[in-house]
Amino acid sequence: MAYPAVGWESAAGRGIIESVRSRAIAWTLAAVAALAFAMGGCGGSGDEAVPDPPAEASDTTLPDPPPTSTTVPPPPASTTTAPSTTTTAPSTTTTTTTLAATTTTTAPPSDYTAVPKPSAGPNRVAPGGALTKHLAADIAAAFGLSTAEVEAAIAGVVLPPEAAGNPEGWLAPGTYEPADGAGAADIVQAMVDRRVAQLESRVPRDQWHRLLTAASVIEKETYNQNEKPRVARVLANRLAGGGPLQMDSIILYPVPEDRIFTTSAERSSNQPYNSYKHNGLPPTPICSPDEASLDAFLAPPPGNWWFYVTINLHSGETRFANTYEEHQANAALLYAWLEDNPTP
């Protein structure tokens, strides 16, 4: 999911790329729920061809949970790099208070403020890196270790039972001051211990996995710290409505290479992270979220937003919408931007 960073190689750039891949390119996101939670529920760009979206949208007055999906309108005929745009229709039972809706003009809304994620540096691991792809290298760079040392430490780290042996998401990003003589194993264990402390201070133990998984999706869906609460609200509404979340950040998690677009084959596959086929959250976290993502999931603002789309991959400007019609107008802005910026 990312903006100006398509192609960046830094840890922060990768987080941006991974965030755009789902929202900017894939349409509207929807994944994680703070309200659902409170109620007891718990990289680089590719050049593959992206199929045109379906020709027409399905009925917009669907029961809850929605049994079908709607699509962003087809892009103009001259657009050759159309993003995947299939999205789930909103539940008719969503009744939360709506915040002031953003407009669909080309100027950023007055409340749009870009607040970048913390960057990596000495003794600091940036948030958002997927463990299986980047996090070991990020940790190694932050502490002057070899990637092989860190990978070995991750393989031997002591995880809580809730992780089920999978360290994904359980290594908390942030700044660490290891003691003299501390090695990779000490640092990696400290990251797990910090994550456990973060979860312990927020939710009962039986909700750790859900919170961490949900926060990891939020982390992947935006690189703007200031935007996480509204993303969480969309995700909360989607989870409360049931059905598949249809988020590219999830579906691309098992893909070995970093890229932006998903393929029709991936969206129709039976792999467990296919958010176009399977309902609800993915089976595991998909990255290592920061505390802002944890808190956004737990306390999203009120709103009926069901869609969002990044309309400018350089600035990261994102528009939120309550209705499919509003979302169509926002999607048109993305298509126009892609026409003007064929190689973002």
Image: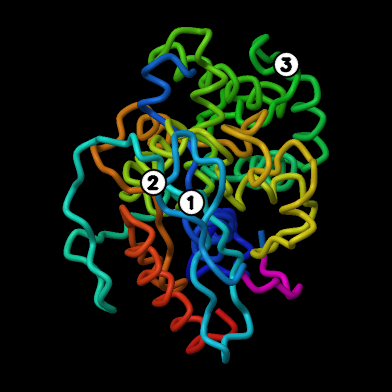
Could you tell me which quadrant the N terminus lies in? bottom right
The question of residue 287 being in magenta is answered with no
Q: CA distance from mark 1 to mark 2?
A: 8 Å
Type of residue at label 1?
A: Leu
Task: Name the secondary structure under disc 3.
Answer: loop
Type of residue at label 2?
A: Val
Among the 4 quarters of the image, the one containing residue 62? top left
Residue 24 screen position, x and y as percent? 50, 64
Left or right: 277 as drawn, with respect to 128 = right
Query: Pointer 2: what residue?
Result: 231
Q: Start and end of the magenta stretch?
A: 44-53
**Between marks 1 and 2 in the image, the one whose residue lies nearer the viewer:** 1
Left or right: 109 as drawn, with respect to 319 = left
What's the magenta bit mostly, secondary-structure-wise? Answer: loop
Mark 3 vs mark 1: which is more N-terminal?
1
Which labelled disc corresponds to residue 249? Answer: none
Mark 3 nearby-residue class (10 Å; few <14, some 14–19, many ≥20): few
Mark 1 vs mark 2: which is more N-terminal?
1
Mark 2 vs mark 3: which is more N-terminal?
3
Left or right: 290 as drawn, with respect to 265 = left
Residue 175 is at least partly visible in this image:
no
Task: Name the secondary structure under disc 1.
Answer: loop
Left or right: 321 as drawn, with respect to 185 = left
- At x 70%, y 46%, the residue is 253
Type of residue at label 3?
A: Ala
Query: Pointer 1: what residue?
Result: 29
Residue 137 screen position, x and y as percent? 71, 46
Query: Pointer 3: what residue?
Result: 164
- Residue situated in front as seen by the camera: 208 or 7: 208
**Between marks 3 and 1 in the image, the one whose residue lies nearer the viewer:** 1
